[in-house]
């Protein structure tokens, strides 16, 4: 083989030991490693950019993030008021602390305020092996403040970029790195990407044979990668070993392990462009990544977020282009969700990395946890019935709420997903303005996409445990149960309430077994969760149901008695009044 006859050097035993050590730790703890990004960047007191953005991004992407702080900035949405650079030897100390102990997959660099700090980072990368280096060449903050002076440019160009697997400059940074080159068009960006690529990583080559199937790979970026050869059909592949995790690099030996760097020139600031265009160049192909420009002032920290998201995706094992695409989409989604949030008085605000403060609903957001008394009068819609009576879903929901419905479920079996999502959003506005929870029948995807308050699922739908994992701890989950066992399972699965029926026979749900008042009583008595009765309930029998005074029964759920009627408002009021009179104990 071409790599035979190379001498095994002593320095390699360190890495071998490290692999054995990591495996032992994993064995001892019985755990698995988690993708890990080390962010080497400055702190932003306003928490929109820098280390804080990197931490939030990695958290949002499910990746562990350790940090080496290179500078502390006094910064807000107005600008950068002061910068305190962390002494270089202390940056080096932080790097050593993290890298000597933790298995970092990807290093992401942001603000590197001095040549000494860049050199400390480079030195660490020659001592400790990582899989990739993502360089965000931070030079000027979005507010226009200089974060890395011109003295550093040549070190970036000559020493940092050649180590990078990807470099992600914006237009101004690309221009600065290329000696002030003018970037005004997409063609200029392509040109810049090509020129920057020429400053990128040199090729790597198999360097040392460690054993029968193990080699060391030297690159200019890493001291040594410990790699294992694996025969996959006719090709010999190279796998990089870290602890128990083995990453197939996809390089076959025939390609002499040559690794090409990547450049992403971000065109967010490109003058006169309607779209946000970024140019990705991998040394062979250009990719024009376009997305529509989101109208918002909340763009502080987009660069840091994009780079740390790329790092997070690489740490999970994504190929470079996939990581870039995912990161771009993540930033767009976060911007869209946060476009109207207001933090600070400056012209450029931060956005919400955790996508929580959804713009069109957060002012009406339900503040309370699930309240079982919400089950008192549960209105469950049916599009067929509303169509029959010539009203929209939104009008039907509004009337039911005015009539006294305390919770609403959209049970739409025959609508197109797109229409269902739009209807749900409109109904949410109605429900939130009245503080009434809105649940979605069956469709967890629609509940998630619309940020509805929860779902109602049955025995043939997704299990409650899975729904809970998807929806998180705050959403309401109801489960249909006809037996004690099902009720027990719903409780274990993390449901908030159960729907129990059919109490009476019904035409609304085909082939629905009727369990009667006795069946309802049995389930309610054994249930650890609050119960709402359903099935054939109307103004003539709701009183009977509630007067049984069985434990845990909190209310009735009704479809046809409200919606298969000419006047939803009148029918809901009637049923509400009747329930209020029922001498039940709504514990
Ligand atoms: C409150 C309430 N209880 C029971 C059901 C029925 O749910 P499921 O068994 O999943 O049947 P479908 O409604 O999906 O036909 C419900 N929807 N609401
Ligand atoms: C949707 C549904 N679930 C049931 C169950 O027994 O779980 S009965 C039912 C239909 C309820 O409609 P109506 O109020 O028109 O009878
Ligand atoms: Mg269902």
Image (cartoon, rainbow, N blue to C red):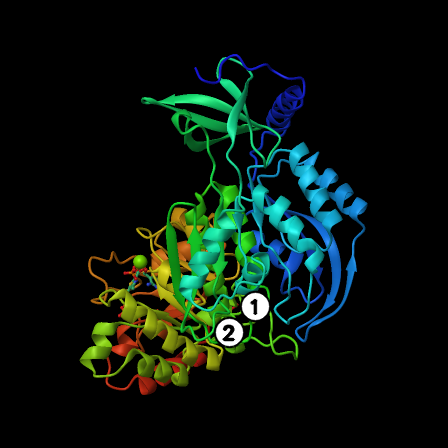
Question: What number of labels is visible?
Answer: 2
Of the four image quadrants, the one with ligand 3 is bottom left
Q: How far is mark 2 from mark 1, CA to CA?
A: 7 Å
Please tell me which residue lies in front, 16 or 58.
Answer: 16
**Residue located 23% across and 63% down the image:** 509
Please tell me which residue lies in front, 168 or 173.
Answer: 173
Up the image or down, 235 lies above or below 299; here it is: above
- Could you tell me if the residues under marks 2 and 1 are in contact, i.e. CB atoms within 8 Å? yes
| Horizontal side of residue 398 vs 5, given as left or right | left
Q: Residues within 10 Å of mark 2 (few under 14, many from 20)?
A: many
Please tell me which residue lies in front, 494 or 468.
Answer: 468
**Residue located 43% across and 71% down the image:** 293
In the rendered image, residue 539, in percent from the top left (x then y), is placed at 32, 78
In the rendered image, residue 193, in percent from the top left (x then y), is placed at 47, 54
- For residue 351, which numbered disc appears in the image? 1
Q: Say if disc 2 is inside 8 Å of ligand 3.
A: no
Mark nearer the N terminus (2 vs 1): 2
Q: Specify whether residue 277 is in view.
A: yes
- Secondary structure under badge 1? loop
In the rendered image, residue 552, in percent from the top left (x then y), is placed at 48, 61
Q: Residues within 10 Å of mark 1 (few under 14, many from 20)?
A: many
Q: Specify whether residue 529 is in view.
A: no
The residue at which mark 2 appears reads as 339
Quarter of the image where one finds residue 444: bottom left
Q: Quadrant of the N terminus?
A: top left
In the rendered image, residue 50, in percent from the top left (x then y), is placed at 65, 59
- Secondary structure under badge 2? loop
Q: Say if disc 1 is inside 8 Å of ligand 3.
A: no
Up the image or down, 269 lies above or below 40; here it is: below
Up the image or down, 37 lies above or below 557; here it is: above
């Amino acid at each position: 083989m071409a790599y035979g006859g190379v001498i095994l050097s002593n320095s390699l035993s360190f890495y071998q030991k490290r692999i054995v050590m990591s495996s032992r730790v994993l064995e001892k703890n019985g755990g698995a490693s988690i993708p890990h990004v080390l962010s080497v960047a400055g702190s932003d007191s306003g928490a929109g950019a820098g280390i804080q953005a990197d931490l939030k991004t990695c958290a949002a992407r499910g990746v562990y993030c350790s940090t080496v702080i290179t500078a502390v900035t006094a910064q807000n949405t107005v600008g950068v008021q002061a910068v305190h650079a962390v002494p270089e030897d202390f940056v080096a100390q932080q790097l050593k602390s993290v890298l000597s102990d933790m298995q970092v997959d990807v290093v992401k660099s942001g603000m590197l305020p001095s040549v000494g700090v860049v050199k400390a980072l480079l030195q660490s990368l020659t001592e400790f092996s990582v899989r990739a280096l993502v360089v965000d060449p931070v030079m000027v903050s979005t507010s226009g403040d200089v974060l890395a002076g011109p003295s550093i440019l040549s070190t970036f160009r000559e020493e940092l970029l050649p180590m990078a697997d990807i470099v992600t400059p914006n237009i101004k940074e690309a221009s600065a790195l290329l000696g002030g080159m003018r970037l005004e068009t997409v063609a200029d960006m392509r040109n810049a990407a090509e020129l920057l690529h020429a400053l990128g990583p040199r090729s790597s080559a198999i360097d040392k044979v460690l054993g029968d199937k193990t080699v060391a790979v030297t690159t200019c970026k890493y001291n040594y990668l410990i790699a294992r050869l694996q025969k996959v059909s006719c090709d010999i592949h190279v796998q990089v070993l870290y602890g128990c995790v083995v990453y197939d690099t996809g390089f076959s030996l025939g390609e002499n392990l040559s690794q090409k760097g990547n450049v992403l020139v971000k065109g967010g600031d490109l003058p006169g462009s309607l779209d946000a265009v970024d140019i990705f160049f991998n040394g062979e192909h250009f990719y024009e990544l376009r997305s529509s420009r989101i109208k918002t002032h909340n763009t502080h920290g987009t660069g840091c977020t994009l780079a740390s998201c790329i790092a997070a995706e690489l740490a999970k094992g994504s190929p470079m282009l996939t990581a870039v695409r995912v990161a771009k989409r993540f930033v767009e989604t976060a911007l869209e969700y946060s476009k109207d949030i207001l933090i600070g008085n400056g012209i450029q605000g931060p956005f919400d990395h955790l996508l929580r403060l959804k713009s069109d609903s957060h002012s009406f957001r339900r503040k309370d946890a699930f309240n079982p008394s919400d089950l008192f009068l549960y209105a469950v819609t049916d599009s067929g019935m509303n169509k029959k009576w010539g009203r929209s879903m939104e009008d039907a929901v509004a009337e039911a709420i005015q009539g006294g419905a305390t919770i609403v479920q959209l049970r739409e079996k025959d609508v197109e997903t797109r229409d269902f999502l739009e209807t749900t959003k409109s109904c949410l506005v109605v429900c939130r303005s009245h503080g009434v929870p809105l649940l979605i029948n069956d469709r967890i995807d629609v509940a998630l996409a619309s940020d509805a308050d929860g779902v109602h699922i049955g025995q043939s739908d997704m299990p409650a445990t899975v729904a809970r994992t998807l929806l998180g701890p705050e959403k309401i989950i109801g489960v249909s149960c006809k037996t004690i066992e099902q009720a027990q399972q719903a409780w274990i699965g993390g449901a908030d309430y159960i729907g129990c029926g059919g109490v009476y026979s019904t035409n609304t749900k085909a082939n629905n077994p009727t369990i009667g008042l006795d069946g309802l009583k049995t389930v309610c008595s054994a249930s650890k969760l609050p119960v709402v009765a359903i099935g054939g309930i109307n103004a003539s029998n709701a009183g009977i149901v509630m007067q049984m005074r069985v434990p845990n029964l909190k209310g009735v759920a009704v479809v046809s008695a409200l919606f298969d009627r000419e006047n939803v408002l009148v029918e809901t009021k009637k049923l509400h009044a009747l329930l209020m009179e029922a001498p039940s104990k709504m514990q």
